[in-house]
């Protein structure tokens, strides 16, 4: 009489019950597995949630930040009467003027400021302005006793050692400092300035006399549509305005894109963190595979008992898979909790530190994506090792097969693993905001994995081909490397990934700091002087020559222009890469010259004659020209002072931007701007022990004698750049630390996965007389040999990655730095040996007696 057959559902229920009971009774070996999944899932879901919180906050507060529904920015000129009439018939219009100038005390001490001239009765249109002491803006800015009111950033008050009630002079106007500017609702839309902000009335701005023809003033008209305008209404109006005035040359922003630069940085930041999170998942996947391999080895006898009791091999696989999925579910849940908390904690920090309107919310789609990533990574890296549980023989109950050659994985498990890999790749690509970037990352990750596998195979083959070493410890280490289930593949992959990240980061940081700490300080300008009236150019040059004898002084005409068409196609319709797209965003510096400018080299074409009188010609920066698809003879149209000028490309230049000298993307023939108003841009370079003292003196005297000219100290800009670079490096370290941490976990799991074999080796060798120091030194040799190979790979791969980043993305000069690479690889090698010995400590401490009774 045969026993009744169980249904498939009953079989799964039994398998689940057994898996759960066995897991509760013996949960060992899953710590590293859980850690790898938790970090990856938390990174994916947390990054998505934080990016969404920032984007939602900007969208919700977009009208307040922009100061309206749509803004129109013009340089050098205000709205024309017909433009103003068009806007006023469609809603409420508010205007502000933005400009750089010098604010000076009565004793001559001066500082650069960013002027914002507003209508005190109407500003701000949305949000709240915070002044200290608290008062209406109209009261703070009104005229009293012949002095205009001024509200200033606390940084300016501290820089000038001023206090409320003090007098300041800006341009030709006298001001009384009435309030400290604690918060302005539209601060983010104005971008980052070189100096602290000051608020003044429109009448006061006119009284300064700063807004002369040719000076760089940005006029921003902010449009508020009537009623509750939808995003569709806003977009429709923006298109109508662009169609009505196609040659206005204004920059149009909508409330959902208040700060294009910030939006781009946010997108790149999110992409960077997403790639790091993906790296963490992939690196953690190695930890998952190692942990599952260790599980299969540790459960060999349990699987053999199930088979001896009649369980089919597929049931054994199902039980093992359910155990892994149960643990993975717990890890994913923990990762989702951490990922959900990240936007809440990050939102508070961003609001306090960066004054960003972050709306901390739970991102359900991001959490779901994180869970899906965690599940797919678990399946990709666990199905293969678990498939080997299918072939655990019943004979495992009678004898160990520590070094038995592994059987080929059955086709069903190969297919299942491949399908999981395809599902993971499809999920990554479909959820990516930048398909090209993600595809490039995926290709690089696959290539790195293949290269590391190839390196590991070569190491194992070399260990087998090399003659036996005389030293018994070295012979033992060599045998461990070439054994069938040796540690070499997993260890090389983990160390190689970790050190590649460290080496590339060290070289990128070194390139940044090398550029920021240049030795040719005499060639770097000490100051930029902007908005020098052309009629005062000779007098100002004489002033500089007198105050700094022997200094290198340069000056060129300067205007602001906007590229509006390329080869007849309007700029708004062009789709170009990031290497050239920046040239189409907003206004660019424009100049004209009879001769080739300094700090650049002509790479194609020829310079025009000094007396050129024909159609306008233009010299274009070579990288921008390539990105825009321009070559010699093509036409480009630029809007300057409301006038569109079309010029033919005469030559291409490679500009040395890092000289910090005067450089322009666009240089025109002098006849292109005949009789056009412009100002002069000056630079001055000098050095010496008294350079800083001379800086202060020149700043004070220039502000007093030439109040129309604004001085930008290059040293301050470089210090700001160095600060930004340091912050970026710190952010890169923190982000890469996630991937490095998971790579370290993968290394630890690789060591743990071979623990059974190491225990048996330790027992046999101790019986033969080996001591703990002998075993420790033998294992150290093994880890050192593998670590050296991985370090060589990391040096080559990390240097290549750093070269691509530095030369391709940052446009800096790559210099290989042996000291940084040696310090990084040697440090990582020491950590590898220490971590490896720590992981094998149990084997070193194992007593022979109990283990011999099990053999």
Image (spheres, rainbow, N blue to C red):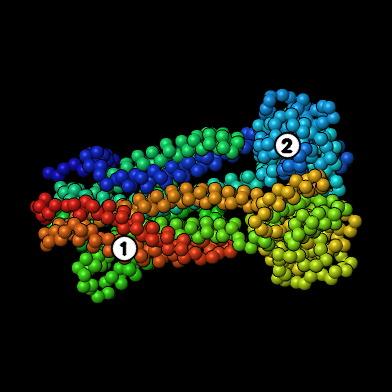
Percent across and percent down for residue 386 are 29, 52
Task: Count all numbered tags in the image, as a single digit.
Answer: 2
Judging depth in this view, the residue of 20 and 472 nearest the camera is 472
Query: In whole angstroms, how far apart are the C-alphas of marks 1 and 2?
Result: 61 Å
Say above or below: 652 vs 26.
below
Q: Mark 2 points at which residue?
A: 198
Residue in the image at 59% along x and 51% along y:
722
Dot 2 lies on which element? strand
Q: Is residue 665 left or right of residue 20?
A: right
Q: Looking at the image, which is closer to me, 376 or 629?
A: 629
- Percent x, y of residue 248: 82, 47
Q: How crowded is mark 1: few (under 14 residues within 10 Å), some or many (20 or more)?
A: some
Q: In which quarter of the image is residue 770?
A: bottom left
Q: Which residue is drawn at 67% across and 54% down?
A: 690
Q: Quadrant of the C terminus?
A: bottom left
Vertical arrangement, residue 512 with respect to residue 707, above or below: below
Name the residue tied to disc 1: 784
Give the label, 1 or 2, closer to the camera. Answer: 2
Image position, residue 325 (x, y; %): 33, 44
One can see residue 384 in this view: no
**Front in this rendered view, residue 259 or 351:** 351
Residue 653 seen = yes
Q: Which quarter of the rendering shows the N terminus?
A: top left
Q: Is residue 166 above or below residue 451?
A: above
* Residue under the point 66% across and 37% down: 158
Q: Is residue 166 above or below residue 771?
A: above
Give the crowd class for mark 2: few <14, some 14-19, many >=20 residues within 10 Å: many
Residue 398: numbered disc: none
| Secondary structure type for disc 1 | helix
């Amino acid at each position: 009489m045969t026993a009744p057959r169980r249904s498939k559902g009953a079989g799964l229920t039994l398998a689940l019950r057994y898996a759960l009971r066995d897991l509760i009774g013996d949960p060992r070996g899953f710590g590293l597995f859980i850690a790898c999944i938790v970090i990856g899932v938390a990174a994916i879901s947390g990054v998505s949630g934080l990016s969404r919180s920032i984007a939602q906050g900007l969208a919700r507060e977009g009208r307040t930040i922009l100061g309206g529904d749509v803004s129109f920015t013009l340089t050098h000129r205000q709205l024309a009467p017909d433009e103003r009439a068009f806007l006023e018939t469609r809603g409420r219009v508010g205007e502000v003027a933005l400009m750089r100038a010098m604010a000076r005390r009565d004793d001559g001490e001066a500082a650069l400021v960013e002027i914002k001239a507003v209508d005190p009765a109407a500003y701000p249109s949305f949000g709240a302005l915070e002044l200290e002491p608290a008062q209406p803006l109209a009261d703070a800015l009104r005229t009293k006793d012949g002095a205009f009111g001024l509200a200033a950033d606390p940084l300016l008050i501290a820089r000038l050692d001023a206090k409320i009630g003090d007098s300041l002079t800006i341009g030709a106007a006298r001001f009384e400092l009435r309030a400290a500017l604690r918060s302005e609702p539209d601060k983010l839309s104005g971008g980052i300035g070189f100096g602290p902000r000051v608020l003044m009335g429109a009448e006061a701005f006119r009284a300064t006399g700063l807004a002369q023809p040719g000076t760089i003033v940005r006029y921003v008209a902010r449009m508020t549509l009537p009623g509750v305008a939808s995003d569709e209404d806003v977009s429709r109006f923006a298109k109508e305005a662009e169609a009505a005035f196609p040659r206005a040359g204004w920059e149009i922003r909508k409330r959902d894109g208040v700060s294009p630069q910030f939006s781009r940085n946010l997108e790149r930041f999110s992409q960077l963190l997403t790639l790091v999170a993906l790296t963490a998942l992939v690196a953690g996947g190695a930890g998952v595979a190692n942990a599952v391999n260790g599980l299969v080895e540790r459960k060999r006898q349990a699987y053999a008992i199930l088979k001896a009791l009649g369980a089919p091999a597929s049931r054994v696989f199902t039980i093992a898979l359910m155990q892994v999925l149960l643990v993975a579910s717990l890890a994913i849940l923990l990762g989702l909790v951490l990922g959900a908390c990240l936007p809440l904690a990050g939102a508070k920090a961003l609001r306090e530190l960066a004054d960003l309107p972050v709306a901390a919310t739970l991102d359900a789609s991001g959490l779901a994506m994180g869970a899906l990533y965690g599940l797919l990574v678990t399946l990709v890296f666990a199905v293969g090792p678990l498939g080997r549980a299918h072939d655990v023989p019943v004979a495992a109950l009678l004898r160990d097969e520590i070094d038995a050659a592994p059987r080929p994985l059955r086709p069903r498990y190969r297919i299942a693993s491949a399908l999981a890999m395809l599902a993971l790749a499809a999920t990554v690509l479909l959820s990516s905001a930048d398909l090209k970037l993600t595809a490039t990352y995926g290709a690089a990750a696959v290539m790195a994995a293949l290269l590391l596998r190839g390196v590991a195979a070569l190491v194992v083959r070399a260990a087998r081909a090399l003659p036996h070493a005389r030293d018994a410890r070295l012979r033992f280490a060599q045998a461990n490397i070439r054994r069938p289930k040796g540690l070499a593949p997993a260890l090389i992959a983990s160390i190689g990934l970790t050190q590649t990240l460290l080496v590339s980061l060290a070289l990128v940081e070194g390139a940044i700091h090398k550029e920021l700490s240049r030795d040719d300080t005499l060639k770097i300008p000490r100051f930029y002087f902007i908005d020098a009236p052309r009629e005062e150019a000779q007098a100002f040059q004489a002033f500089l020559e007198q105050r700094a004898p022997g200094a290198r002084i340069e000056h060129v005409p300067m205007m602001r222009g906007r590229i509006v068409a390329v080869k007849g196609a309007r700029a708004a319709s062009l789709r170009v890469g990031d290497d050239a797209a920046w040239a189409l965003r907003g206004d660019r510096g424009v100049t004209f010259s009879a001769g080739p400018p300094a700090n650049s080299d002509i790479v194609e074409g020829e310079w025009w004659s000094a007396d050129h009188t024909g159609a306008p010609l233009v010299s274009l920066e070579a990288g921008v020209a390539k990105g825009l698809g321009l070559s010699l003879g093509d036409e480009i149209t630029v809007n300057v002072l409301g006038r569109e000028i079309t010029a033919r490309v005469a030559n291409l230049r490679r500009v040395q931007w890092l000289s910090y000298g005067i450089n322009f993307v666009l240089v025109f023939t002098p006849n292109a701007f005949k009789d056009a108003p412009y100002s002069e841009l000056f630079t001055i370079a000098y050095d010496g022990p008294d350079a800083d003292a001379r800086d202060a003196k020149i700043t004070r005297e220039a502000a007093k004698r030439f109040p129309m000219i604004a001085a930008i100290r290059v040293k301050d800009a470089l210090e700001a750049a160095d600060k930004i670079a340091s912050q970026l490096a710190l952010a890169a370290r923190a982000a890469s630390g996630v991937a490095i941490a998971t790579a370290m976990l993968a290394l630890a799991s690789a060591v743990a996965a071979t623990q059974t074999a190491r225990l048996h080796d330790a027992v046999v060798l101790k019986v033969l007389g080996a001591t703990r120091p002998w075993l420790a030194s033998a294992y150290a040799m093994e880890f050192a040999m593998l670590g050296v190979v991985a370090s060589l790979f990391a040096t080559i791969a990390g240097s290549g990655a750093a070269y691509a980043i530095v030369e391709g993305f940052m446009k800096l000069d790559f210099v290989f730095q042996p000291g940084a690479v040696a310090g990084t690889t040697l440090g990582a090698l020491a950590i590898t040996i220490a971590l490896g010995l720590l992981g094998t400590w149990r084997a070193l401490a194992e007593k022979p007696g109990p283990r011999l009774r099990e053999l």
